[in-house]
Image (spheres, rainbow, N blue to C red):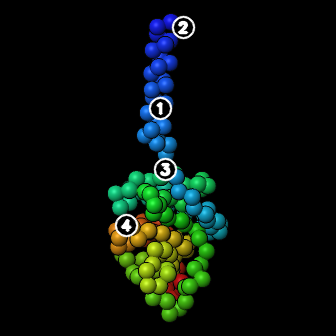
Amino acid sequence: MTKTLRRCAAALAALAAAGVLAGCSPATAELPAPSPGPAADDLCRELLERVPQTVYDQERVEVRPETPYAAAWGDPPIALRCGVGRPEELRPDSELTVVNGIAWLPEPGERPDLYTAVGREAYVEMSIPATYGAPAQGLVAMSDLIDQEIPALPAGEL
C-alpha cells in the first residue's frame, strides 16, 4: 500500500470514528402518518411546505414513516400533523384555546400536550411535550400558517 493510500485510509477511518462518536446520524421522530381526505390533501401539503425550520429553538428533524403531512422538531419531538381525524373529545361545548384566530382543542384536560386546530377544512394536530414549557410559542407560529393555508369552515362548524 502506498503512503498516499495509507493516509487516505487512516483519514477515512478517523472520520468514520468521529462520526460514530458524535452521533452524526440525523435525528428522527416516529409519528403516525395522517391520511387526509381528498379535500384536505393539497391544503395539508401546502401547509407543511411552509412550516418553519425551527420551533422553540429546536431544529426540524426527519419524520418516520416519511409523509408530506407531518413535521417534527427537536428531541423530545414537537410534532405537527395535518389531515388528522376529528378529535373524539370535540363537542359543541368544548373549551377551546384561541390563538391568532385559530381555535385549538387542548387534550388531555388539566395538563394538555396535544392541541388540534378545529373549525378549518383540515384538522391540524400539534403535540408539544411539557419539557418545552407553555405551548404559546408553538401555537402562535402554527396558527398564523394555518390561518393562511387552511380555509375556515362556515360559522358554527367544528
Q: Amino acid at mark 4?
A: Tyr
Between marks 3 and 4, how big is the CA–CA gap?
A: 18 Å
Q: Amino acid at mark 2?
A: Met
Chain-order first, disc 1 or disc 2: 2
Quarter of the rendering containing residue 54 = bottom left
Q: Amino acid at mark 1?
A: Ala
Chain-order first, disc 1 or disc 3: 1
Q: Mark 4, residues whose alpha carbon is within 10 Å: few (<14), some, or many (≥20)?
A: some
* Residue wearing tag 2: 1
Q: Quadrant of the C terminus?
A: bottom right
Frontmost of labels 2 and 4 is: 2
Chain-order first, disc 2 or disc 4: 2
- Closer to the camera, 121 or 140? 140
- Closer to the camera, 127 or 154? 127
* Residue wearing tag 1: 17
Please provide percent x and percent y for residue 112: 45, 78
Q: Mark 2, residues whose alpha carbon is within 10 Å: few (<14), some, or many (≥20)?
A: few
**The disc label shown at residue 27, or none:** 3
Residue drawn at x 58%, y 68% is 83
Question: Can the viewer see residue 58?
Answer: yes
Residue farthest bottom in this picture: 93
Q: Quadrant of the N terminus?
A: top right
Between marks 2 and 3, how big is the CA–CA gap?
A: 38 Å
